[in-house]
Amino acid sequence: MTFACFFLGEYSSIILMCSLFVVLFLGGWLPLIPSIKILYMIPGWIWFSFKIVFIMFFFIWVRATLPRYRFDQLMMLGWTVILPLSFGLLFFTISLLWIYDMHLYVYFMYFVIIIWIIFLLYNYFINLNVSRV
């Protein structure tokens, strides 16, 4: 019984994550292609359910086919791949803002980067004296 409750919790969290993804990134109950007016004849709850089922299929498919990461591998992936990628995207955003003459936003982004670098250096120097087990 505990095994069933565990998987019930797992899949209910998948449904919740997929519904949040649909609301935030796929337009919620609106049709996929808003320029085609005949798609508005389909009710919104059908669009919403279709999008959730599609994202759930993709989510479960990726989860079943790719190997699972251990926690240390996940942390290493985050620090070595995802963090530099996010910095690259941040610099790309800054360059686009600079190209389109939005200097106030560029200064704000530079401020955010400087604060982030100070935070990383502070954490690096604090963790130098901690012994690893």
Image: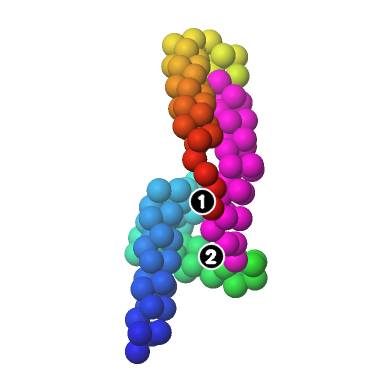
Front residue of this view, candidates 79 and 10? 79
**Magenta stretch, main secondary structure class:** helix
Q: Earlier in the sequence, mark 1 or mark 2?
A: 1
Give neighbour class at mark 2: few <14, some 14-19, many 20+ (Cα, 10 Å): some
Where is residue 70? Give x, y as percent: 57, 62
Front residue of this view, candidates 76 and 61? 76
Compared with 88, 7 (above or below) is below
Badges 1 and 2: C-beta atoms under 8 Å apart? no
Give the total number of marks visible in the rendering.
2
Under circle 2, the secondary element is helix
Q: Amino acid at mark 1?
A: Ile
Front residue of this view, candidates 26 and 72? 72
Under circle 1, the secondary element is loop
- Residue displayed at 47% across by 12% down: 107
Q: CA distance from mark 1 to mark 2?
A: 22 Å
Q: Which residue is mark 2?
A: 59
Does the magenta segment cover residue 92? Answer: yes
Where is residue 32? Give x, y as percent: 49, 54
Does the magenta segment cover residue 37? Answer: no
Location of residue 98 by image quarter: top right
Q: Residue furthest bottom?
A: 1
Task: Say whether residue 118 is left or right of residue 13.
Answer: right
Task: Say whether residue 22 is left or right of residue 70.
Answer: left
Query: Which one is closest to the eye, mark 1 or mark 2?
Result: 2
- Residue displayed at 40% across by 48% down: 24
- Residue displayed at 61% across by 49% down: 77
Residue 28 visible to an observer of this rendering: no
Where is residue 65? Give x, y as percent: 65, 70
Q: Which residue is mark 1?
A: 33
Chain part drawn in magenta = 68-94
- Residue displayed at 62% across by 35% down: 84
Q: Amino acid at mark 2?
A: Phe
